[in-house]
């Protein structure tokens, strides 16, 4: 009889303990995820930090923390990671009462984009490990993966040529109110540019050099439309990298840079337009905008996108640089028009090696072929 009472008592204690555990396992339990950096470059590695805080005395013998994130963030071939439409990662912890656990997980950013983790799934088992208990928590951590850098000799030659094109344009558009310096006279200089005081001092004719009033105003036009049934995602990705590289180069040279693209924003679903601006803040805005372009969403015809902003581009005399793999007549005509009105434009054709360049430089529009190699 005594043995039976002891057995019944033990069962009762277990049932009470199990009930208490079920009601209290998730109380004062905080689990969070944070990307170590808010932004990294395509192809770089970074860390994701998992933090668990159990602020009560109750011991959690098994706690599984799970979350899903884009498979473009590669967490390696771990047993607790599965990949389907997303990468699903699950880590198991044993958490003592009043304990804080911090773990860092490395990953590789395989592709440009904007990535969020908005949900954490918590799973534990009862004290007798006979049933599972679930809880879903909200999370808000995000990461920008900026487009990969353009490197190598081809990139350097392209940027040198681009700098020459812009410098030539600026010299044609001098502002008489922005003095830059003095140089020797040439037969092509008008007489009203002669600095007579400097000429008398040196004994030779000298002329004033003036800065351009529009030298620092560039707008990048990025077309990511596929006009045929074929999809050229890698070509568009290379175009996005080129736009990022040009934006960084121009902004570091003190220019103002803007962006117009028919690519859809993965957060807002709209076309992206960023007005001209300068400084470090503009670099971040441009790189973030380029990171958020979602190539899976069908864009509008770029000539339609351009028509909406044409008056702004004309009023600011922007030097327009079009980056596209398309070469249809309407698009070429639009850039030729902008070149005539704004004293120059550049058509950068991003093409695979087997693609033909069908357009030529002419008038105020120059054409450059950029080969996209697999």
Image (spheres, helix red, strand yellow):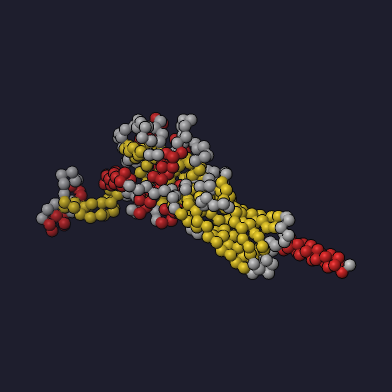
Quadrant in which the C terminus appears: top left
Residue at figure coordinates x 37%, y 32% from the top left: 355
Residue 288 shown left or right of residue 209 in the figure: right
Say whether residue 126 is left or right of residue 33: right
Could you tell me which residue is drawn at 28 percent across and 53 percent down? 178
Query: How many labels, in total?
Result: 0
In the rendered image, residue 73, in percent from the top left (x then y), is placed at 51, 50
- Residue pictured at 47% horizontal, 50% vertical: 109
Would residue 331 appear left or right of 206 to someone viewing this image? right
Give the percent coordinates (x, y) of residue 207. 19, 51
Residue 138 visible in the current orientation: no
Give the left or right position of residue 14, taking residue 297 as reference: right
Instruction: Locate the N terminus by quadrant.
Output: bottom right
Q: Residue furthest right?
A: 1
- In the image, 201 versus 277, the foreground residue is 277
Identity of the residue drawn at 41% across and 34% down: 326
Residue 219 placement (x, y as % from top left)? 39, 45
Q: Give the camera-side residue of 197 and 208.
A: 208
Q: As displayed, is residue 318 above or below residue 4?
A: above
Can residue 265 be seen by looking at this rendering?
yes
């Amino acid at each position: 009889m005594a043995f039976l009472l002891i057995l019944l008592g033990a069962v009762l204690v277990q049932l009470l303990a199990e009930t208490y555990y079920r009601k209290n396992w998730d109380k004062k339990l905080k689990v969070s995820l944070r990307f170590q950096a808010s932004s990294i470059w395509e192809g770089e590695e970074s860390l994701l930090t998992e933090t668990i805080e159990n602020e009560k005395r109750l011991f959690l013998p098994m706690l599984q923390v799970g979350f899903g994130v884009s498979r473009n963030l590669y967490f390696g071939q771990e047993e607790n990671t599965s990949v389907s439409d997303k990468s699903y990662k699950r880590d198991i912890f044993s958490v003592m009462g009043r304990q804080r656990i911090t773990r860092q997980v490395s990953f590789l950013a395989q592709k440009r984009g904007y990535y969020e983790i908005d949900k954490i799934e918590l799973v534990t088992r009862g004290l007798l490990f006979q049933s599972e208990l679930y809880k879903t928590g909200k999370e808000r951590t995000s990461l920008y993966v900026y487009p990969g850098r353009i490197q190598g000799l081809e990139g350097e030659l392209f940027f040198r040529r681009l700098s020459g094109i812009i410098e030539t344009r600026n010299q044609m558009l001098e502002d008489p109110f922005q003095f830059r310096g003095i140089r020797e006279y040439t037969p092509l200089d008008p007489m009203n540019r002669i600095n007579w005081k400097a000429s008398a001092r040196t004994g030779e004719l000298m002329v004033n050099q003036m800065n351009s009033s529009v030298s620092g105003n560039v707008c990048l036009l990025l077309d990511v439309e596929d006009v045929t049934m074929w999809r050229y995602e890698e070509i568009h990705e290379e175009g996005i990298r080129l736009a990022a590289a040009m934006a960084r180069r121009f902004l570091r040279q003190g220019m103002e840079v803007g962006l117009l693209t028919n690519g859809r924003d993965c957060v807002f679903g709209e076309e992206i337009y960023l007005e001209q601006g300068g400084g470090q803040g503009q670099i971040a805005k441009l790189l973030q905008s380029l990171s958020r372009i979602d190539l899976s969403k069908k864009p509008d015809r770029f000539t339609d996108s351009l028509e909406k902003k044409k008056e702004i581009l004309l009023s600011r005399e922007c030097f327009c640089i079009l980056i596209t793999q398309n070469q249809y007549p309407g698009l070429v005509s639009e850039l030729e028009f902008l070149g005539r009105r704004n004293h120059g434009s550049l058509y950068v054709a991003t093409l695979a090696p087997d693609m033909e360049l069908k357009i030529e430089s002419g008038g105020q529009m120059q054409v450059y072929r950029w080969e996209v190699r697999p």
